[in-house]
Amino acid sequence: MGCFFSKRRKAEKEPKKTEGGEKPPKQYSWDQREKVDPKDYLLSGLKDETVGRLPGKVAGQQFLIQDCENCNIYIFDHSATVTIDDCTNCVIFLGPVKGSVFFRNCRDCRCALACQQFRVRDCRKLEVFLCCATQPIIESSTNIKFGCFQWYYPELAFQFKDAGLSIFNNTWSNIHDFTPVSGELNWSLLPEDAVVQDRVPLPTTEELKAVRISTEANRSIVPVSRGQRQKSSDESCLVVLFAGDYTIANARKLIDEMVNKGFFLVQTKEVSMKAEDAQRVFREKAADFLPLLNKGPVIALEFNGDGAVEGCQLIVNETFNGTKMFVSESKETASADVDSFYNFADIQMGI
């Protein structure tokens, strides 16, 4: 037995008929989404221009740049994928890209970008300040030079999160060449003192100048690491920070303190660990850290320089007293610590 109110509700839910007695077409959620115009995510055929997109204007869409010459291009937002075809003598900045960045048939370009995958094919004379979560790949290309991504603007940290990228997973210098030539090297690393702004200058248009940019190393969202450059010392130190409310802030603070004391940041990694992983990496100390693994991924930092182990222990004890971290015990064990952790991390991430 129904009630009067249930009938009234049913009548209210039924769509009203049009004047011709026909019901209007059914409305679906996907019909009400904002329409995407592909032209908003395309830069094509430009010459001698400075153009770009402000934060919030790309919002995770795919982007295409093609047939541009002598242009300065700045995408200050996160994207799904970016393809760059047939560009010559261009400056290109790309905010975090969730998937791949693919350069094809480009030459004489200078770039700064962050992505999950990076690939170059049929290109020559590129300079790239890179943050890449996986191994960068070049193919049929020559004179490609790499440096570590070094950039800041206020929205950038949130864009990394929106793109699903970690600022600590950066294999910028671990290049794979699909088409090596015997006796030649198709890629190299930029000089360590290369100034980002000299190669990727800040935008000059009033619209793009509104983005508050810094290219100072100590403000970079991505920690500036030495990567596979030759180490200055035979002493390294491994530090592993465990997930918590201030893990990223603590990692940044530790990097600043160590760099200010003259040590070098070699590499960083953010990865999840299981109990068996901890047993292999931390050995007899593993039991101390097992309860912390369930809280989330760990962040590992490798520092290098004479006295790195003692210097790191002092800073951790003075600045982070009460925060549990793994720090190499001695110069003699530190090398094995670094190898154990990064071998595990590379297997875990498929690098």
Image (tube, rainbow, N blue to C red):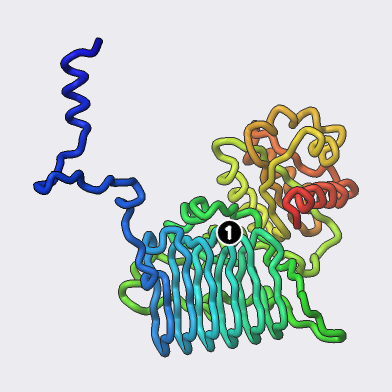
Res 317 quadrant in image: top right
Residue 76 locus on image (x, y percent): 43, 66
Residue plotted at (20% across, 25% down)? 9
- The amino acid beneath tag 1 is Val
- Furthest-top residue in view? 1
| 57 shown above or below 238 | below
Q: In which quarter of the image is the C terminus?
A: bottom right
Residue 63 locus on image (x, y percent): 47, 69
| 108 shown above or below 290 | below
Residue 35 locus on image (x, y percent): 32, 60
Res 336 visible: yes
Task: Pick whichever, 118 or 125, lies toward us.
Answer: 118
Q: How many marks?
A: 1
Task: Pick whichever, 328 or 346, lies toward us.
Answer: 346
Q: Quadrant of the N terminus?
A: top left
Residue plotted at (34% across, 46% down)? 29
Q: In this view, does 14 lie to the left or right of 219?
A: left
| 215 shown above or below 239 | below
Residue plotted at (56% across, 80% down)? 110
Res 263 visible: no
Q: In this view, does 46 lie to the left or right of 175?
A: left
Q: Name the residue under label 1.
A: 222
Residue plotted at (34% across, 68% down)? 210
Q: Is the residue marked by circle 1 packed among few (<14), some (14-19), or many (20+) residues within 10 Å?
A: many
